[in-house]
Amino acid sequence: MRSCPPCFWLAGALVLSACDSPLPAEELAPRAFQKASLEAENGKDLNGKDLNGKDLNGTDLSQVIVSVSFNPAIRGGALLDDAWLRGTTFYGYKGSTLYLGAEFVGVQFQGNLGSGGTVPVRITGMNPAPAPNADVSLYGLEYRTADGTWQPVCRDANGAPAQALPVDGYWDYHQGVAGGGSKTEDPTRFTFACMGGAIAKCALWGYRPWASYNGFPLAPYHQACTRMVRADYCGTGQSYTKTGNRINFYDELGLQQDAADWVFEAEWDMNGARCFYALNRTHSSLPCFDSRVELLCGQQLSTSRGVLLRDETPGTLGIDLGL
């Protein structure tokens, strides 16, 4: 644990409708996380262990659902005039009738494949996430295969169907290349983030990309978190961790606080590790080692330098030989 003077840092939510009604409660800052320190597990997956029958982080994205279009959205056989997200709740109009929340169960969207093709995706269920994330809605999802059958979009490590939460925009799932792991804000598309993947984990850990906290948008923190939890040090989408590796992470907004006396590892922003401490883990094999290693990394969390998150690991004598 390293001391740091109080400091602050900062798109966030996007709404696809011209509706000017007040934001619902889920748009508000997640107060339940104000004093919640975290010891969490790393994981390689950006968006779940399995999506549409393929490893989402594989090199072949041709049959991977890389995004979902808001329109067309079909409800009860009728095409909605418009559909959009606020937080994790869907809204849509058909004529002058507004549909929202659980009324989207059964709605069919268009899933966009990495090949450029499309596949139907439908919502099969909706429920609140367990506390302290009851403001977040989780969804059951299926996609239609070429033979007309419907299969779960998300699966857990054991192959069982898993739920997802929707997040505006979409990610680049390529690894080891410029732009890998980056997010694109697109008012026409969103991501169904499978439970267990970094996108969903970071939202449930308090970094709601659609929300603000004390006036600071959380979207940059969420993106930095997706880099951190996957140990995407170089910011290329390449994960350098093993599932089960533990981290303690924190920020200066008060959402996550440093409560563990572990060994400092790295400072993070939206593009990966701004720097990492060479004596924690074996970073020498990283392609970005020379440009990002820093002996004094973590001495001060500086908003002027754009640092968003820091993490620590339970290394032995400051050295953890496993990435």
Image (tube, helix red, strand yellow):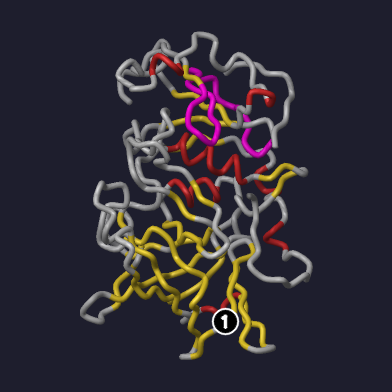
For residue 240: magenta?
no
Residue 19, quarter of the rendered image: bottom right
Q: Position of residue 82 (x, y in %)?
A: 59, 77
Q: Quick check: 179 above or below 14? A: above
Residue plotted at (78% across, 71% down): 21
Residue 52, quarter of the rendered image: bottom left
Quadrant placement of the N terminus: top right
Q: Is residue 155 visible?
A: no
Which residue position is annotated with label 1? Answer: 103
Compared across the picture, whether 232 is left or right of 8 comes to left
Residue plotted at (67% across, 22% down): 302
Q: Position of residue 309 (x, y in %)?
A: 58, 31
Q: Position of residue 64 (x, y in %)?
A: 31, 59
Compared across the picture, whether 287 is left or right of 170 comes to left
Residue plotted at (29% across, 72% down): 151
Q: Quick check: 238 above or below 265? A: below
Residue plotted at (67% across, 48% down): 32
Q: Quick check: 64 above or below 197? A: below
Compared across the picture, whether 170 is left or right of 305 comes to left
Secondary structure of the residue carrying numbered label 1: helix
Quadrant placement of the C terminus: top left
Q: Quick check: 151 above or below 97? A: above
Q: Amino acid at mark 1?
A: Glu
Residue furthest out toward the left? 147
Segment tinted magenta in the rendering: 254-274
Q: Is residue 135 visible?
A: yes
For residue 262: magenta?
yes
Q: Position of residue 227 (x, y in %)?
A: 46, 37
Task: Categorize mark 1 by other alpha carbons within 10 Å: few (<14), some (14-19), many (20+).
Answer: some
Compared across the picture, whether 70 is left or right of 46 comes to right
